[in-house]
Image (cartoon, grey):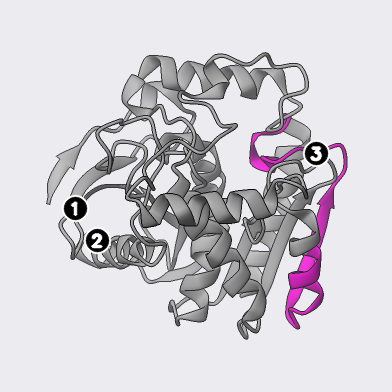
């Protein structure tokens, strides 16, 4: 293991955070982020969403560390400072959604090698919630999960859904799966779109923070997904919705103005989750942990109270 860049200057995280380069079983270099805590009995795993990176959740790591937990996270393959998978580094891509499970395996190995205590739970946002649910189904050794707007379905206009299904599959047949998905941005929309009516947060300071982080460390920027990513994501969401809920406690947060992932899928899944609780964030967009300070503090209190019961 070798040291990887970690940028405490762009985030409000614990002072002892650091990052390492680790190689997956299929030779993809990942950046692993760790916030150890002396005396911690357990570790919380943070699974970020598409386009995201370790530093973005450092303030959540600080809340968890203050509650007595060590914390670990990672940049998924194809984003953050981990290896990008296409010649165009701004295009989100993955060869198979199952590959993300190899990233989790590498994270787990790193936690053990660095002497952090065993994981207790995952805190998973958006795409991280999709990857995290698959990991739980496959037996990830944790006691529970906290989800934030998990990607168990993707919002598309009804007329576009069959088109997206056909186009992405035809593109894959002709070797064009790496093409940028129509209607998405080639570069990060956070750097170019106005704060007004954005789909991520109602808090102008957090919107500015996200843009400032990418401007300060340009290697973190990521644009829209490839057609392959869209095809694979839609298929994985459908498979997860068919699968029974894991026999674990789960707490899920969902903004009442969610416009990125499909709220109906989250409601449906949580209604069928025997040990699951759904909390609606009033006046909330997609990224609850990036809302204003009062909403963030309330979510953090609920999250930690839930984790302490596991």
**Residue 68 visible:** no
Q: Position of residue 43 (x, y in %)?
A: 43, 63
Which of disc 3 and disc 1 is earlier in sequence? 1
At 64% across and 61% down in the image, what residue appears? 152
Q: Is residue 217 magenta?
A: no
Residue in front for this viewpoint, 177 or 98:
177
- In the structure shown, which secondary structural element does the residue marked by tag 3 occupy? loop
Which of disc 2 and disc 1 is earlier in sequence? 1
**Which label is found at residue 110?**
2
At 76% across and 37% down in the image, what residue appears? 285
Please name the residue that numbered disc 1 is placed on. Answer: 22
At 52% across and 80% down in the image, what residue appears? 137
Q: Position of residue 276 (x, y in %)?
A: 74, 74
Q: Is residue 53 left or right of residue 259?
A: left
Q: CA distance from mark 1 to mark 3?
A: 36 Å
Which image quarter: residue 165? bottom right
Look at the image and give the residue range highlighted in magenta: 267-292
């Amino acid at each position: 293991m070798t040291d990887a860049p970690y940028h405490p200057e762009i985030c409000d995280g614990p002072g002892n955070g650091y990052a390492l380069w680790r190689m997956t079983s299929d030779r993809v270099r990942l950046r692993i982020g760790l916030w150890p805590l002396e005396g911690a009995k357990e570790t919380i795993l943070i699974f970020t969403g598409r386009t995201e990176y370790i530093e973005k959740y450092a303030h959540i790591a600080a809340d968890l560390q203050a509650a007595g937990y060590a914390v670990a996270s990672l940049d998924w393959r194809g984003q953050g400072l981990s290896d990008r998978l296409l010649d165009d580094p701004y295009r989100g891509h993955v060869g198979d959604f199952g590959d993300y499970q190899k990233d989790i395996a590498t994270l787990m190995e790193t936690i053990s090698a660095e002497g952090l205590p065993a994981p207790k739970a995952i805190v998973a946002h958006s795409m991280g919630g999709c990857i995290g649910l698959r990991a739980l189904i496959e037996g990830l050794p944790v006691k529970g999960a906290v989800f934030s707007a998990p990607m168990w379905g993707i919002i598309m206009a009804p007329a576009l859904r069959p088109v997206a299904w056909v186009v992405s599959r035809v593109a894959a047949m002709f070797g064009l799966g790496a093409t940028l998905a129509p209607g998405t941005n080639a570069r990060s929309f956070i750097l170019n779109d106005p704060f007004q009516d954005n789909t991520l947060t109602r808090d102008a300071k957090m919107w500015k923070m996200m843009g400032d982080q990418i401007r300060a460390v340009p290697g973190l920027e990521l644009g829209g997904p490839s057609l392959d990513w869209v095809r694979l994501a839609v298929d994985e969401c459908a498979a997860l919705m068919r699968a029974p809920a894991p026999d674990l406690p789960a707490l899920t947060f969902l903004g009442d103005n969610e416009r990125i992932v499909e709220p109906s899928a989250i409601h449906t899944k949580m209604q069928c989750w025997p040990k699951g609780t759904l909390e609606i964030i009033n006046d909330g967009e997609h990224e609850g942990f990036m809302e204003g300070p009062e909403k963030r503090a309330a979510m953090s209190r609920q999250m930690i109270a839930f984790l302490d019961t596991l």
